[in-house]
Image (cartoon, rainbow, N blue to C red):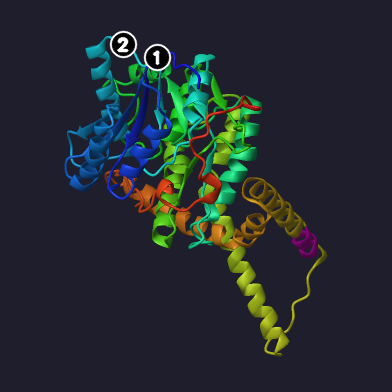
Amino acid sequence: MSKINGPVAVFVPAWGEEGVIGDTVRHALSVWRHRELRLYVGCYGNDPDTIAAAIKAGAALSVQGDSRLRIVIHDRDGPSTKADCLNRLYQALRDDERRTEQLFTCVVFHDAEDMVDPAGLDLLEREIAAGADFVQLPVEPLVQKSSRWLGSHNCEEFAEAHGKGMVVRSALGAAIPRAGVGCAVSRGALHKLARRRIDGSPFDADSLTEDYELGLSVAELGGVSRFVRARSSDGSLIATRAFFPNKLPHVIRQKTRWVHGIALQGWDRMGWRGTLSEIWMRARDRRGPLAALVLLIGYALLCVTLLLWGAAAFGAAPLLPLTPYLKAMIRVNIAAFLRRAAYRFAFTSQAYGLVEGRRAVARIPVANIVSIMAGHRAIVAYARTLLGDAIQWDKTPHFRHPASADLPPLQDLNRSALTFESSRL
């Protein structure tokens, strides 16, 4: 275990997380034994269940002599926004710094349902100590046997995004957007972000995707950003793991927040600044609503085509001939789909095995339908904010933490002999 160069803070905002926050606290502080670590859990006064669950976990730790947990109660009722809750945690951190007269070296961000990697903190701290201002580790959604189609479809999306997209982004020198979890920001960079705002807080309380904006903002201030892929001595990827939503309304709500915050609100808030590669990456980030529209039109045309073919087969309508142009377009689209499916299969198989790789290809229509529904909902939500509706933390509920589940590949979570490979990209 590497020596921490100074105190490290971990921020965990929580609203309605009574089902997982206790397991998250216990697991994080059991595998991260650094003495100079302080875990800040942000709660709301009108959420007594989450507060009680956090206090219960803290009491059990106190019996063991562990006093690294700090529960911070927001001075306003929730839910506000995740960014607002993080600002409250930042205020608590500042209060502790003034009281102890010692600055934290960095702040690590996690969500209430995350299972941290035992080697994650050492790796993040090492990169910050080496001069990085922002460091992002991969996120690895866990396969859910009880929800192969909805709950597991994020596996392939993150496998490809964090196995290819973020790697290319880093190689091109474009800003690394924060995934919301498994990332660290240097104390100096966070201070610079706070100085830009009148209220002295690093995040805009009206932002739906403060995580995405944080990585871009650090880069705009001249900070060094790194996306780090590393493996431990047992070959497992050092990553943050969690169960993603597995009910359709919750899945749609989560994707809506991402599309609304990144594609629509992000366009307004972050603009199109930067190099050509940066502008290109921001365009890719914001393609969600357009992609949803194209997918909707494509599926509609597919349905119409199948109906016409069916009618022609029963003699109810003439079979319309395909022009050479349409035949060429069909071939191009089939080739593009096969290429897309091959990428999805390859990256998912690398992370989860060949069986899950095949499932990832079969789940493509499910992911597309989710994107269509989330894109529509995001546009409606964005239009409402333009008409004056307040922005709130439209979060998804979490009922199970990975540490309490039967996960054979992740049972050995207290491994100590760690080696880092290809850590900087």
Instruction: Describe residue 364's horizontal placement relative to residue 11 as left or right.
Output: right
> Which class describes the residues within 10 Å of circle 2: few (<14), some (14-19), or many (20+)?
few
Secondary structure state at the residue bearing disc 2: loop
Q: Spot the residue most to the right.
A: 324
Q: Which residues are magenta?
A: 325-331
Q: Pointer 2: what residue?
A: 102
Query: Residue 192 has which mark?
Result: none
- Looking at the rendered structure, the kind of residue marked 1 is Gly
Q: What's the residue at 39%, 38% (across, down)?
A: 27
Q: Which mark is residue 6?
A: 1
Q: Is residue 123 magenta?
A: no
Location of residue 33 in the rendering, given as x and y in whole percent from the top left corner: 40, 27
Check disc 2 and give the amino acid type. Gln
Residue positioned most to the front: 64
Asked if the residues shown at circle 2 and circle 1 are in contact, with their CB atoms under 8 angstroms apart, the answer is: yes
State the predominant SS element of the stretch in magenta: helix
Query: For this view, does 217 lie left or right of residue 89?
Result: right
CA gap between label 2 and label 1 equals: 9 Å
- Quarter of the image for residue 109 reads top left
